[in-house]
Amino acid sequence: MKIYSIFLSIQGEGITIGAPTVFIRTSGCPLRCTYCDTPQAFDKGEEMPLEDIISRVEEYGVGTVCLTGGEPLAQKDSYRLIDRLLGKRHLVVVETSGAITLEEMPCDANLSISMDMKCPSSGESSRMMFENIELLGPTDQLKFVISDKRDYEFAKKVVTEHRPSCAVVFTPVGGKDLKDLAEKVLKDGIEVRVLPQLHKFIWGDSDNR
């Protein structure tokens, strides 16, 4: 697999926020979101055998592993890596966009899919596969990064029409300015979680390992 970096940090987003996590950041992504905070992972990285990736992960001695990118599911070997990590009793979180089908994802109590449904301001909302929402279950999460009113209305409509059976997370672009978004959610009575990007409060905007 082509890997940009493997590192230990705190999970900054979603329902496992705050948990010590080993991140495997893959290289490559078919999308070009306007607000992408890891463009360095588009094409840089090195080819690594699965055994080497797993050995690096095991060195940290941490139970939770996050496969992120880029877009990890753009590499077919990601499925083999997920199976290997689950076999080692890791809790595996796969961060993916809504632009690649989830039909090939294994079913496992220790696997959590974090699907980032792209809103209009990303420039990539037309590429979302809404049928993926039906494939998300109780251990998964559906995340929306929200920049403006149009994004908010888009996210609200998706949640209302599709009624996902997983946790739903609204996060502001930049991950810090929560007040306006939180007030909108409370006013409209939407059953979602408003969460920050915790790593940006801890290490700032420049920490994009």
Image (cartoon, rainbow, N blue to C red):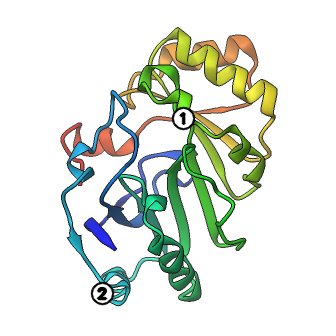
Q: Which amino acid does label 2 sit on?
A: Asp
Q: In this view, does 175 lie to the left or right of 186?
A: left
Quadrant of the image containing the C terminus: bottom left
Q: Where is residue 189 in the image (x, y as percent from the top left)?
A: 76, 18
* Quarter-of-image position of residue 37: top left
Q: Secondary structure beneath disc 1?
A: helix
Residue appearing at x 50%, y 13% in the figure: 180
Comparing 206 with 36, the one in front is 36
Comparing 196 with 98, the one in front is 98
Q: In this view, does 39 lie to the left or right of 99?
A: left
Q: In this view, does 42 lie to the left or right of 161?
A: left
Q: Position of residue 56 (x, y in %)?
A: 30, 82
Residue appearing at x 64%, y 57% in the figure: 102
Residue appearing at x 69%, y 38% in the figure: 130
Q: Secondary structure beneath disc 2?
A: helix
Q: Find the distance from the CA under tag 2 to the CA under tag 1.
A: 33 Å
Dot 2 crowding, Cα within 10 Å, few <14, some 14–19, many 20+: few
Whether residue 183 is situated above or below residue 15 in the rendered picture:
above
Whether residue 81 is situated above or below residue 36 in the rendered picture:
below
Residue appearing at x 52%, y 32% in the figure: 118
Quadrant of the image containing the N terminus: bottom left
Comparing 134 with 159, the one in front is 134
Q: Mark 2 points at which residue?
A: 52
Q: What residue type is labelled 1?
A: Arg
Would you say the residues marked 2 and 1 are in contact, meaning their CB atoms lie under 8 Å apart? no
Q: Position of residue 2 (x, y in %)?
A: 29, 69
* Quarter-of-image position of residue 163: top right
Q: Name the residue under label 1.
A: 127
Dot 1 crowding, Cα within 10 Å, few <14, some 14–19, many 20+: some
Which of the two labelled residues, at mark 2 and mark 1, occupies the earlier sequence position?
2
Mark nearer the viewer, 2 or 1 = 1
